[in-house]
Image (spheres, rainbow, N blue to C red):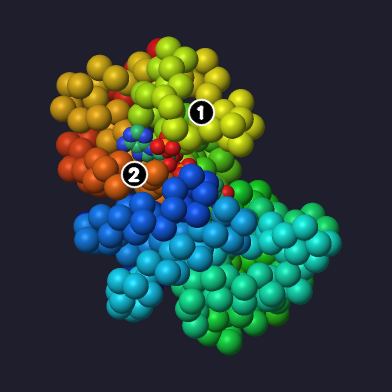
Amino acid sequence: MNYRKMGKHGLKLSELSLGSWVTFGGQVGEAVARDCMKVAYDAGVNFFDGAEVYSGGAAEKVMGKVLKREKWRREGLVLSTKIFWGGKGPNDVGLSHKHIIEGVHAALRRWQQDYLDLAFCHRPDPDTPIEETVRAFDILVKQGKIFYWGTSEWSAEDVFKAHDVAVKHGLTPPAMEQPQYNLLTRDRFEKEYAPLYEKLGYGTTIWSPLASGILTGKYAGGKMPKGSRLSIDQNAWLKDLVATPERIEAASRLEPLAKELGCTMAQLALAWCLKKPHVSTVILGASKPQQVKENLKALDVAAKLDDAWLQRIEKTLAG
Ligand code: NDP
């Protein structure tokens, strides 16, 4: 495992990490989550990604239990939460001072930790002045309850606003973005965010590197494997969003390249992410420990992806 700096910051993240969206505490229980986390940890993964909304808080609870049981050294870990959707009440959502402080405190209880390394604004909140949000995160940083704060799927313009407010008032500026980035979803990461890397030294912790499994090829030709993420009723909204015929077809064009490289389609798609500049870590998602094992081998495939290969991938994808 290699460790990358989170942008200009001193924190080092394993280049592959593990997240818990819809899986831990939802699709799978504690035993499977533990097995997935152990495979990852044994391979050198140091970053585990949570959010207050994941399985209504159950994902962070499950990961907290695993950490307690395994007694992994806290200093060797990077743990996160994301704040925005904390519940049904009017003050349980968004990025108000109240919800940020209460949301992070609740996340600390679920994780059973005294501090978290990273806390993200899970989305922008047009109902709250950015200055209020910046001030709340600054307090948490100064109290040592979180070490870095950042954004997820904010516009670059809003990130700059938050940065400028922080600098103007001597507060802690945001440090990182958590955008979706994969072979099929690219523009925001590659174009809109370019000034964040260049001017602010932003790091990124990218999500859905396999487009929820589309890039594994397992949905090719409209197949819907039983038990897979997009086959589950409560994920119908996600299926409508990501499993369009065009995206499935584009993914299947990559199959011959994976064969030639001697790897799986998942490994090829993850290796491509690993090769892209400004990716601090690629967050894996997994419903089975075997998937984590398979996906970790993307590190070896990335070593084979030279410029010629990257160009072939682009050309093949373009059709
Ligand atoms: P992926 O796009 O990699 O999808 C992961 C899913 O794909 C797995 O749960 C599994 O689903 C399937 N899969 C993974 N590997 C394989 C394999 N080798 N073979 C077959 N199927 C495979 O990542 P996620 O969408 O899970 O995103 C990763 C993390 O990013 C999340 O866990 C979360 O922490 C974070 N995230 C952040 C968001 C944000 O707004 N900031 C939004 C979404 C995610 P199955 O087996 O059920 O088909």
How many dots with numbers? Answer: 2
Dot 2, how many residues are within 10 Å of its Cα: few (below 14), some (14-19), or many (20+)? some
Q: Is residue 105 visible?
A: yes
Q: CA distance from mark 2 to mark 1?
A: 16 Å
The three-letter code of the residue at mark 1 reads: Ser
Q: Is residue 174 above or below residue 259?
A: below
Badge 2 or badge 1: first in the primary sequence: 1
Judging by the rendered image, the residue that carries numbered circle 1 is: 231
Measured as percent of width and height from the top left, residue 312 is found at 28, 22
Mark 2 falls on what kind of element? loop
For this view, does 12 lie left or right of residue 145? left
Question: How busy is the neighbourhood of tag 1: few (under 14 within 10 Å), some, or many (20 plus)?
Answer: some
Where residue 310 sits, quadrant-wise, is top left
Task: Determine which quarter of the picture holds residue 214.
Answer: top left
What's the residue at 50%, 54% (across, down)? 25
Query: Residue 236's spot in the image, x, y percent?
Result: 61, 30
248 sits to left or right of 58: left
Inspect this view and state whether residue 298 appears: no
Q: Secondary structure at mark 1?
A: helix
Residue at 65%, 49% in the rendered image: 155
Residue 288 numbered mark, or none:
2
Q: Is residue 126 above or below residue 167?
A: above
Ligand 1 is within 8 Å of the C-beta of the residue at disc 2: yes
Picture residue at 49% right of the left edge, 71% below the top: 111
Amino acid at pointer 2: Lys
The x and y percentages for residue 161 are 70, 61
Position above or below: 250 against 180: above
Does the closest atom of ligand 1 sit within 8 Å of the Cβ of label 1? Answer: yes
| Tag 2–tag 1 contact (CB < 8 Å) | no
Q: Please give left or right for residue 260 compared with residue 31 in the image.
A: left
